[in-house]
Image (cartoon, helix red, strand yellow):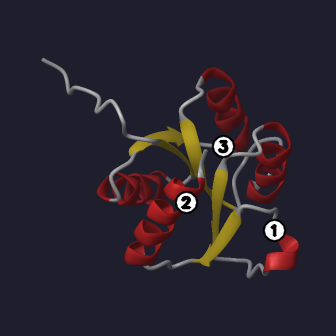
C-alpha cells in the first residue's frame, strides 16, 4: 500500500534547481509537518500553482532557471495568488524588506533549518 496523505497537511511548494538543495529543503518542509511539493524552476512552479489549490506557502531560491527568477516568481505569486506566503532564499544575494514582495520572508544561504521550520509554522497560521 502507498503512503496515505494526511488530510489536513498544508502543501508547501519548494522551487530549487539544485537537486541536493531541493531534497534538503523538502526534508525541512516535511519536518515542519507540511506536504512538500517540488519544482525545478519558476515555469514548473506556475504550472503546479495553476493545477493545485492546496499550496499555502512557496519556498523558492532567487537564482532559478526558466522564464523568471525567484524574485519575479514571488511577484507573480503575489499578483495571482495573494494569500500564498513566500520564503525566498539565496546564497548570492542579500535582500531587504523593501526589495521583496509583501507576505515574503528572506533567508540568506546557508539558512538555519530550525528558523525555516518556525517561519513555515508561523506562515501557516497567517494563511486563510
Q: Are marks 1 and 2 in contact (CB under 8 Å)?
A: no
Q: Give SS at disc 3.
A: loop
Q: Which quadrant: the N terminus?
A: top left
Count every numbered label the image shows and give the total: 3
Q: Which residue is mark 1?
A: 100
Q: CA distance from mark 1 to mark 2?
A: 16 Å
Q: Secondary structure at mark 2?
A: helix
Q: CA distance from mark 2 to mark 3?
A: 22 Å
Seen in the image, is 17 located left or right of residue 78? left
Q: Is residue 79 above or below residue 115?
A: above
Secondary element at tag 1? loop
Quarter of the image holding residue 41? top right
Residue 123 image label: 2
Question: Residue at left 59%, top 56%?
Answer: 126
Mark 2, Cα crowd under 10 Å, few <14 / some 14-19 / many 20+, is some
Which residue is depicted at the point 50% across and 54% down? Answer: 124
Q: Which residue is mark 3?
A: 41
Please report the residue visible at 83 percent of the width from the left and 41 percent of the height from the top.
67
Give the foreground label among 1 and 3: 1
The residue lying at 28 percent from left, 33 percent from top is: 6
Amino acid at each position: 500500500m502507498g503512503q496515505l496523505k494526511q488530510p489536513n497537511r498544508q502543501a508547501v511548494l519548494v522551487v530549487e534547481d539544485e537537486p541536493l538543495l531541493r531534497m534538503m529543503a523538502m526534508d525541512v518542509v516535511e519536518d515542519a509537518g507540511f506536504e512538500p511539493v517540488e519544482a525545478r524552476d519558476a515555469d514548473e512552479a506556475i504550472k503546479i500553482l495553476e493545477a493545485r489549490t492546496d499550496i499555502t506557502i512557496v519556498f523558492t531560491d532567487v537564482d532559478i532557471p526558466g522564464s523568471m527568477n525567484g524574485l519575479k516568481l514571488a511577484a507573480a505569486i503575489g499578483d495571482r495568488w495573494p494569500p500564498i506566503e513566500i520564503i525566498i532564499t539565496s546564497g548570492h544575494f542579500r535582500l531587504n524588506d523593501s526589495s521583496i514582495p509583501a507576505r515574503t520572508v528572506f533567508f540568506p544561504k546557508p539558512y538555519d533549518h530550525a528558523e525555516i521550520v518556525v517561519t513555515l509554522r508561523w506562515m501557516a497560521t497567517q494563511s486563510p
